[in-house]
Image (cartoon, rainbow, N blue to C red):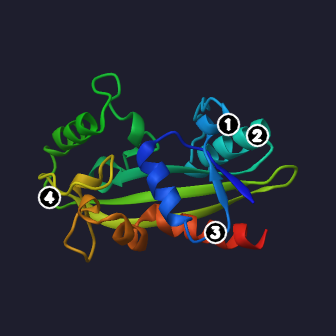
Amino acid sequence: MKLLIATTNAGKKREFLSLLSDSNLMLVFPDELGIKMDVEETGVTYAENAILKAETLCKLSGLVTLADDTGLEVAALGGRPGLYSARYSRAVVNSDTGRRVELLKELDQFPQPWLAKFVCVTAVAFPGEGTQTFDGEVSGEIIREERGDFGFGYDRIFLVSGLAKTMAELNLDEKNLHSHRAIAVNQAKILLQTY
């Protein structure tokens, strides 16, 4: 069965390909189908945004579609950047490095530890049928020093609880055992393999 993965993010593509490599699914991405990934994320929850992306691309492609919405929630910032993690301070900086720098600048006014969690919601849209969502999260803390060469986004400053490693110090196989996206995708995989 073909499964459209609703992302153009290179880091997410690698993770989805790895997470679903042992499934009987043939993964395709919007650019391979000539579909422009231009869905405005107007939802007020991760689930709403994931559903928007999954249902929009499902209608455009006619394929079962999986989308996710993911965010970093920092306790000291009242859960921000949250839904806006990928667009955090975009007016000032538009890069992973820039967003990490901006986050650390904002956290400087608060005492450490800076407790945080990564949250992911995946949505699977079926043509002519309903959409189902699955949640995953992983706890940790934000650290000042960037560590690791794997991953993307905030991974280099997110120390995973109980591992003494940042998310970026985990290779893809290790990350697939511990990440918020892996938890959510593995639940979706069970549904997809029985579809």
| Badge 3 density bin: few <14, some 14–19, many ≥20, Cα 10 Å | some
- Is tag 2's residue or tag 3's residue first in the polypeptide sequence? 2
- Is tag 1's residue or tag 3's residue first in the polypeptide sequence? 1
Residue type at mark 2 is Ser
Task: Choose top left, top right, bottom left or bottom right for residue 40.
Answer: top right
Q: Which residue matches tag 2?
A: 61
The reply to whether dot 4 and dot 1 touch (C-beta < 8 Å) is no
Foreground residue among 146 and 45? 146
Judge depth for marks 4 and 1 and give the one in front. 1
- Is tag 2's residue or tag 4's residue first in the polypeptide sequence? 2
- Is tag 4's residue or tag 1's residue first in the polypeptide sequence? 1
The reply to whether dot 1 and dot 2 touch (C-beta < 8 Å) is yes
Foreground residue among 18 and 83? 18
158 displayed left or right of 108: right
The reply to whether dot 2 and dot 4 touch (C-beta < 8 Å) is no
Q: Which residue occupies 34% across, 67% down?
A: 139
Q: Which residue matches tag 1?
A: 33
How far apart in space, not on screen, are marks 4 and 1 (Cα)? 46 Å
